[in-house]
Amino acid sequence: MAKSKTKIEWVTQAELARILDVDRSRVSYLLHKDRRLRPAARKVGKRFMLDKAKALAIIEATRAPQQIAGGDSTSSYIDARAMREKYRALGAKLEYEQKREELMSKADVVREATVAGILIKEKLSAIPGRLGALAAAESDPFKCEQMLKLEINQVLEDLSVTLSKAELKGGKNAG
């Protein structure tokens, strides 16, 4: 029984580069530096010959074609530059809005919210002191409820006026 031997098609680095549509230097890199094409290579004199089928199989198995071609370096540079420009534009927009006082820093928001919270707490905490004696003297629960609602509404209205006058940084900070 005779063995069927497939004939190996040997190609040079330049020929493989043309097949892959890449520079010859890229094939040289994959052969010498990266060494992934070493199993498909055979040195003939000063040159390396490559088993075409084996080399193509190795390349297909290890990386996507654009990575073999080295095309990702240019596209990644373009992507990085586009991202840099995007963030530069966002920074300029943020600076512009801060100058127009449309934006507040997080620290300013926290400070203003704390001031508003303290003011609300103080005003609402004063209600029992003002209404305690009146509510104790009133025997009708409906009238007690009405007094409380009226007082709470008045306190909330006063707070609304006070906080809007302070303009809690909506544009300018008076507080």
Image: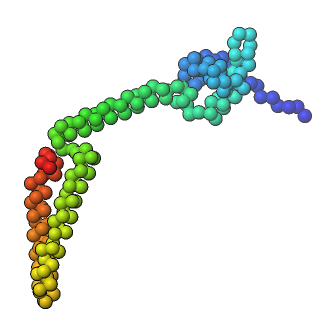
- From the image, which quarter does the N terminus lie in? top right
Residue at 28%, 35% (x, y): give it.
91
Using the image as rendered, state which of residue 18 and residue 60 is in the foreground: 60
- Say whether residue 21 is left or right of residue 1: left
Give percent across and percent down for residue 3: 86, 31
Residue at 18%, 64% (x, y): give it.
122
Query: Where, by quadrant of the figure, is residue 158 drawn?
Result: bottom left
Give percent across and percent down for residue 70: 52, 25
- Residue placed farthest to the right in the image? 1
**Residue 14 in view (yes/no):** yes
57 in relation to 123, above or below? above
98 in relation to 128, above or below? above
What's the colour scheme? rainbow
Residue at 62%, 30% (x, y): give it.
59
Give percent across and percent down for residue 110: 26, 51
Using the image as rendered, state which of residue 4 and residue 87 is in the foreground: 87
Query: Where, by quadrant of the figure, is residue 61 drawn?
Result: top right
Using the image as rendered, state which of residue 125 and residue 161 is in the foreground: 125
**Residue 142 in view (yes/no):** no
Using the image as rendered, state which of residue 124 and residue 3 is in the foreground: 124
112 in relation to 40, above or below? below
Give percent across and percent down for residue 67: 54, 30
Q: How many marks?
A: 0
Residue at 69%, 16% (x, y): give it.
48
149 in relation to 97, above or below? below
- Say whether residue 22 is left or right of residue 10: left
- Residue placed farthest to the top in the image? 46
